[in-house]
Image (cartoon, rainbow, N blue to C red):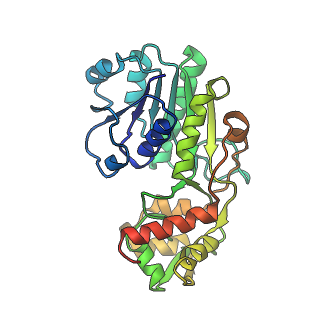
């Protein structure tokens, strides 16, 4: 086994590399060399630097005959290059998102639901096109693909989701100082996280169970969702606070904040995010080590420490 992790110096990617190293799997990172924030957590891992859409560079890199390729930030051009220039490839696994199911046709949602990309202007639409491409390549030419669709990624390494559907830097400070937080509608929309370390383990499990996972798509999430109200209660409770919430319609929030926030992010936040991980449990023995509540608390605490707030 010889694994190439594309984007292995990023937040999700370096966690995957850590899982592979823990299990004594030979791994190489492919990176453009621009991200170094997590390099101290993955010392002594061989790294090759290239743009994954550079066909000549990728042909040379792929001549090393990697048996497994994990792509944390797929692009259509790179997928096409891998399909044509990766001799001896046993398994290609890329990271997508559950966001393309929105609005959910049923709750909890599973992999049988239509994946429409949510909005042609959003990144989820591009993910839909890439997911469709690798699944079609599996069906027509046996390309050994698996797609991992995580929910809202949380845990150590990034700031928590804020009340407007982004990850703004002053969100935790506002919570700690008990500032009023505008929240879409009535705060009853569901939010379901996945801990970044459990997500990394899901990639490893898919790789370890190819007879089940080849040609499959998996929604990867923790075991239940919480409402946006509960999410803010848990986040504030870590600091001994209670959230101050002002409910507004999505349109009124957009009128108030304008281009300062992402319209796609806000509209997505106001929709339910609620999935079952039963297929991943069955096929690739996915067993998350974290609960949603623990994950929300940990993300808040570590984010506050990162910002010097506690």
Q: Position of residue 164 (x, y in %)?
A: 48, 69
Considering the image in quadrants, where does the C terminus appear?
A: bottom left
Viewer-closest of 36 and 45 = 45
Relative depth, front residue between 78 and 153: 153
Across and down, in percent, residue 236 comes to 54, 78
Residue at image point 35% right, 18% down = 64
Q: Is residue 79 or residue 208 the one in the foreground?
A: 208
Q: Position of residue 287 (x, y in %)?
A: 67, 46
246 vs 271: above or below? below
**Location of residue 47 in the rendering, given as x and y in whole percent from the top left corner:** 30, 33
Q: Residue at x 46, y 70 (%)?
A: 254
* Residue occupying the point 44% across, 74% down: 172
Within the image, what quadrant is residue 177 found in? bottom left
Q: Is residue 67 above or below residue 46?
A: above
Q: Is residue 160 visible?
A: yes
Whether residue 118 is visible to the viewer of this picture, yes or no, is no
């Amino acid at each position: 086994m010889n694994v190439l992790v594309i984007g292995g110096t990023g937040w999700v990617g370096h966690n995957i590399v850590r899982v592979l190293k823990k299990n004594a799997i030979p791994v190489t990172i492919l990176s453009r060399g621009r991200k170094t924030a997590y390099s101290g957590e993955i010392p002594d891992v061989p790294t090759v630097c290239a743009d994954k859409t550079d066909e000549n560079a990728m042909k040379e890199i792929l001549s090393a005959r990697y048996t497994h390729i994990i792509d944390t930030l797929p692009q259509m051009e790179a997928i096409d290059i891998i399909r044509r220039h990766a001799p001896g490839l046993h398994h290609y696994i890329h990271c997508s998102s559950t966001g393309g199911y929105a609005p959910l046709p049923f709750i909890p949602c599973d992999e049988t639901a239509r994946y429409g990309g949510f909005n042609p202007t959003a990144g989820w639409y591009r993910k839909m096109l890439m997911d469709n491409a690798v699944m079609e390549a599996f069906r027509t030419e046996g390309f050994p693909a698996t797609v991992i669709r995580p929910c809202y990624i949380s845990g150590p390494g990034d700031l928590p989701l804020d009340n407007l559907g982004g990850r703004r830097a002053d969100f935790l400070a506002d919570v700690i100082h008990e500032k009023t937080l505008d929240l879409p509608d009535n705060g009853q929309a569901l939010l379901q996280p996945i801990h970044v370390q459990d997500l990394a383990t899901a990639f490893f499990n898919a790789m370890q169970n190819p007879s089940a996972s080849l040609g499959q798509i998996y929604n990867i999430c923790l075991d239940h969702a919480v409402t946006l109200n509960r999410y803010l209660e848990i986040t504030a409770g870590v600091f001994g606070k209670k959230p101050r919430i002002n409910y507004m319609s999505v349109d009124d929030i957009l009128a108030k904040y304008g281009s300062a926030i992402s319209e796609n992010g806000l509209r997505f936040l106001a929709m339910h995010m609620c999935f079952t991980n039963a297929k991943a449990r069955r096929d690739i023995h996915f067993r998350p080590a974290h609960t949603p509540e623990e994950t929300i608390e940990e993300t808040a605490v570590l984010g506050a420490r990162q910002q010097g707030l506690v």
